[in-house]
């Protein structure tokens, strides 16, 4: 199955509501392009309730960068999947390496967040990726498959279908370093094959596999059009129109 490419912006803890408006205003001129490549903006949670109005005239969606694994209750400061749906989110990033590293999210916990997102009809973007040390020890595939398996073992083919997995080597995030095209293809093809083995070929083809880590305008065409790469997850370069638009423009 050929998918429309998906480009997801991860703003992390950056920007203001005015910065979002500036980006969206500039993106107005790309309306025709945005009908050919799917773009979603994962902005800080406090800005999400404004996105429905802010994006009203653009064919784009928005999403969150994290979600709580519980349905509701006494969890001060947390945000549920239902709340993200309420403000119109389509996607939620789960298991980003920064959350694994700085907030102690391990794979079983990430899997519970994934499940909560799916139960609320959000599309989770499950991030997987190895550290530099793991890559150097030859553990890349073992690490990413273990991160993926934590989710696969608690869900079904039906629920996993049409979700998104982002391969983000930790050492490539925000560093300007990227794997070689061969390294990206090898991980993405292994991820696809793993889904075929776990479920079946038809299910695996519904899952979009994004690459993330130092994607810029000048490497997007090369990295995001490789075999089994269905788009990208973009951090730093997604904050400004001048650096973000060349990335999705490279995919049409
Ligand atoms: C990310 O944080 O998901 C990411 C890919 O960051 P950057 O593009 O800045 O490397």
Image (cartoon, rainbow, N blue to C red):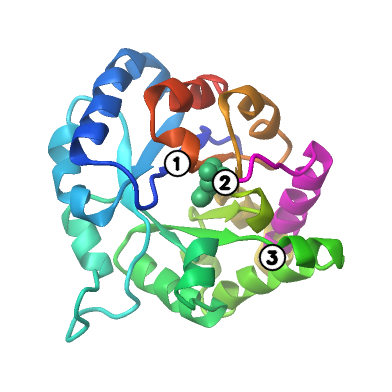
Which tag is nearer the camera, tag 2 or tag 1?
2
Q: Which residue is mark 1?
A: 8
Task: Identify whether 8 is placed above or below 116.
Answer: above
Neighbours of disc 3 within 10 Å: few (<14), some (14-19), many (20+): many
**In this rendering, position of residue 63 left or right of residue 112:** left
- Secondary element under disc 2, as helix, strand or loop, is loop
Q: Main structural element of the magenta stretch: helix, strand or loop?
A: helix
Quarter of the rendering containing residue 70: bottom left
Query: In front: 196, or 18?
Result: 18
Quarter of the rendering containing residue 141: bottom right
Q: Residue sitting at 32 percent across and 21 percent down?
A: 27
Q: Which residue is mark 2?
A: 174
- Secondary element under disc 3, as helix, strand or loop, is helix
- Secondary element under disc 1, as helix, strand or loop, is strand
The image shows a total of numbered marks equal to 3
Task: Identify whether 113 is placed above or below 205.
Answer: below
Neighbours of disc 1 within 10 Å: few (<14), some (14-19), many (20+): many
Distance between mark 1 and mark 3 Cα atoms: 20 Å
Give the magenta range: 174-195
Q: Position of residue 215 (x, y in %)?
A: 59, 36
Return the disc, 2 or 1, that comes first in the chain's sequence: 1
Q: Which residue is mark 3?
A: 144
Whether residue 248 is visible: yes
**In this rendering, position of residue 233 left or right of residue 85:** right
Whether residue 96 is visible: no
Task: Identify whether 210 is placed above or below 160.
Answer: above
């Amino acid at each position: 199955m050929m998918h429309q490419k998906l480009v997801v912006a991860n703003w992390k803890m950056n920007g203001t509501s005015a910065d979002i408006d500036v980006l969206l205003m500039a993106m107005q001129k790309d309306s025709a392009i945005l009908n050919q490549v799917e773009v979603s903006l994962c902005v800080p949670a406090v800005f999400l309730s404004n996105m429905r109005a802010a994006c009203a005239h653009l064919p784009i969606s928005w999403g969150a960068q994290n979600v709580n694994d519980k349905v509701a209750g006494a969890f001060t400061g947390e945000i549920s999947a239902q709340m993200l749906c309420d403000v119109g989110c389509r996607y939620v990033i789960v298991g980003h390496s920064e959350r694994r590293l700085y907030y102690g999210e391990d794979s079983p916990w990430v899997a519970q967040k994934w499940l909560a997102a799916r139960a609320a009809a959000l599309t989770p973007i499950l991030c997987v990726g190895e550290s530099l040390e793991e890559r150097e020890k030859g553990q890349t595939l073992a690490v990413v498959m273990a991160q993926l398996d934590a989710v696969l073992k608690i869900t079904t083919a039906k629920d996993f279908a049409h979700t998104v997995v982002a391969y983000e080597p930790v050492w490539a995030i925000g560093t300007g370093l990227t794997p070689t095209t061969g390294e990206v293809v090898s991980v993405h093809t292994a991820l696809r094959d793993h889904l075929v083995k776990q479920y079946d070929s038809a299910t695996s083809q519904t899952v979009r596999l994004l690459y993330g880590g130092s994607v810029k305008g000048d490497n997007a065409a090369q990295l995001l059009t490789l075999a089994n790469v269905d788009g990208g997850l973009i951090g730093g370069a997604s904050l400004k129109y001048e650096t973000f638009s060349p990335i999705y423009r490279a995919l049409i």
